[in-house]
Image (cartoon, rainbow, N blue to C red):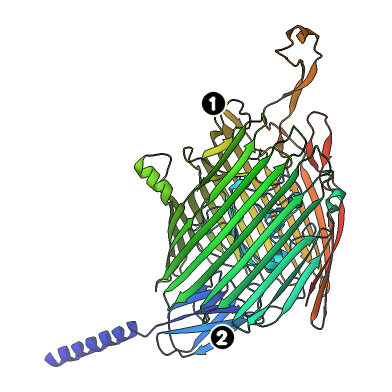
Amino acid sequence: MKIYNLIFLSGFVLLFSASSLQSQERKVTIQGSVVDSASGERIPYATVMIAGTKIGAVADVNGYFILRNVSPYDVKLQVSTVGYREKTFDIGNISGTSRTLRLELAEAPKALPGVTVTGERLVGPGGNVSTKIITAGELQKNVGVFKNDVVQYVTQLPGVVTVSGITSQYFVRGGGADENLVMIDGMPVYNLSHAFGLFSFVDPLIVKVANFSTGGFGAQYGGRLSSVFDIQTIDGDNRHYKAAGTFDLLSSDVQVTGPIISGASSFVIFFRRPLYQNALNKFYSLGLPFDFYDGFAKATTDLSGTGHISAEFLTSADNIKSQDQAQPDFTWGNVSGAVSGNYLFGDQFNLQGEVAYSSYKAEQLPKASAALYHQFTQISTPSLSGSITSYFESGSEVNLGLLFSFPTYTYSFTNTYGSVISQSESQVEPNVWTTYTFKNGGDLSFEAGVRADLQRMFTKISGSGYGYFAEPRLSVSYKIDEPVSVYAAYGMYHQRLIDLNDENLVFTPFEVVAALPDDLGDEAASQYILGVSLSPDILSSIKAEAYYKDFSRLLQVNRDKVYSYEPDFFVGTGRAYGFDLSFKYDIEQWYVEGSYSFGKTSRSFDGLAFYPRYDLRHQLQATTGWQPVDNMWLRARWKFTSGLPYTPINGFFGAVQFDPFNLPGYTGQPLYSQVLFGDLNTARLPGFQSLDLSASYDVKWDWMHFALQGTVINAYNNKNVFYINNVTGSVVYQLPTIFNVSLGWSL
């Protein structure tokens, strides 16, 4: 028996030792960046997989990735992303504990600015379940009015509403236009409009990638209630000198990029100006000439393949002057600059930081008209931000971030009755946030985060005024099987800045941005999102998403204030709910995508409940493109929306002008016709529909590329109502059929 016991014990020890050795098998970490093989620019959101396994990672917006717990033997990496050729890298055996790699992908064949579509299976930032990733290829498919425009593309997405056929002002899922956060490389932008909103100053030539979130955005974003538009600009080509530009009816632009130190640093310079200052007179009856310019410059230096430092400058200005003394002049502009950096330390930490400055200034100059008032707003915001991300062996991440901004808010607003509401103050706004992202490669993933405004938190704790503790954020996603996923999100949001313009105005050239007084506190809202996505293959996708927004605290300027004892602002509430359906199918020669959105929005101020002007109930869109021959694309976009609300007229009545210094003449005064308006926004305009067509042809000759594009807006000349003059009864229509030709070039 003793010999058998000895044999059994020896076998058990050997088995345990083998198991221990297997469990202690050496693992390594692979990290690095995914870059464009031609330009050396980092590629965001590329997928890096260990061949033959489910182990993988998605590169961040800067193109950096980390793979943990990788077997060091015979390593092969499969790298893919939209617009680039998929490639397998044979790494072989890895000695040591980690390896830093620079993985280069070749762009898929395309002629400028044609489209090569290989599906849209892009994975963006964790936790942002309602985020659309907008790439350069997506922008090329946009049927723009006069040229491809980033904001015009956003207005075509489900859940996004505009109040005219062509505008850069948009409303997201029941939120006001001032509830949208817009950032360019982390710098806030307060006004996007050019030429009365006809297009924006965010030109596709300078955009690398943009994330547009219609809700449920993570704790790294704050200060707005409804949406986030996070735009990342290109770094430039660090290997070749290049130039590109476009000419069209309204403007011309030029971009120059190239290496500062070949293979290590690069620059990019961009500038745009209008060609004809009176071009808008062909489309609008305003009779106002306009002038504007955009400028952008950026220099980037890579740091050992896992980091970079960038310095950039962005400026934009508009100037609209009227010869009519009864019409005001308008001027507004943005100036921003930043120095930012990103570095991947070892195999565990990613550090990002930015020092930035943003400013916005706008004025309405009334000239000789007594019926108009001077409006003025100016914001200057120096800021310091940073974050650190820690990667765990399980594949999960923890992110800690901070943002210290030192804004100065100045505004002067005159309401309908001549009462002036003004403010000038400087503040310190410290914000911190943290998120935990669970993604171990299984079917379940989630992101939990919290954001805190330290100033509001201390105010709440001390009881010295309005405040709140923190803003919780949570998103969860579960893959039922390979093609089907369900997800949900919840978030609490606050906002300190509002637009003083009346949302019911037909035309607002720019935003009069104001900071809410500390004694009133911030606006507040909670969002709830539930959705399902179906991706049966790499070429097609279907998505359905429902949402509910509880605006528990909203503020509105008192536009009817007459006496000093009346409040400057009203406090109100609101809610919005609806759902979005969308589908997409892409192949090399053609694509088709469509969406349907339903939404209902209501707001209540000072005892008055109403539907805001952007309460659009139904919206249906379809876009398609076809490549009949090489280098040619035919595109079409059709859109239908139900009518927008407006305030009807119930009748007219006669009134006399009372003069207290001429009482005897009171009975002899003539009657003046006065309008008796109905309830606010209880009537609806007719529905809107339009068909836009475009055709483009690309020519490549040696080292030169040219792209000729023709566009037809409102092809069947549908008379879409812009607004109805309630007093005269006249109807003003939106744009008629418009033809435009543009030329793009690249050297």
Q: Report the front residue among 220 and 191.
A: 191
Disc ID at residue 89: 2
User: Residue 416, position in %: x, y?
Assistant: 67, 31
Give the side of residue 5 with respect to residue 263, left or right: left
Which image quarter: residue 293? bottom right
Which image quarter: residue 153? bottom right
User: Residue 313, position in %: x, y?
Assistant: 63, 65
Q: In the structure shown, which secondary structural element does the residue marked by tag 1 occupy?
A: loop
Q: Is residue 358 above or below residue 7?
A: above
Disc 2 to disc 1, C-alpha distance:
73 Å
**Residue plotted at (64% across, 72% down):** 82
Q: Amino acid at mark 1?
A: Tyr
**Residue plotted at (52% across, 79% down):** 303
Q: Amino acid at mark 2?
A: Phe
User: Residue 340, position in %: x, y?
Assistant: 54, 68
Give the side of residue 351 with respect to residue 577, left or right: left
Label 2 close to label 1 by CB (< 8 Å): no
User: Residue 702, position in %: x, y?
Assistant: 81, 83
Quarter that holds the N terminus: bottom left
Note whether residue 741 is visible: yes
Disc ID at residue 565: 1
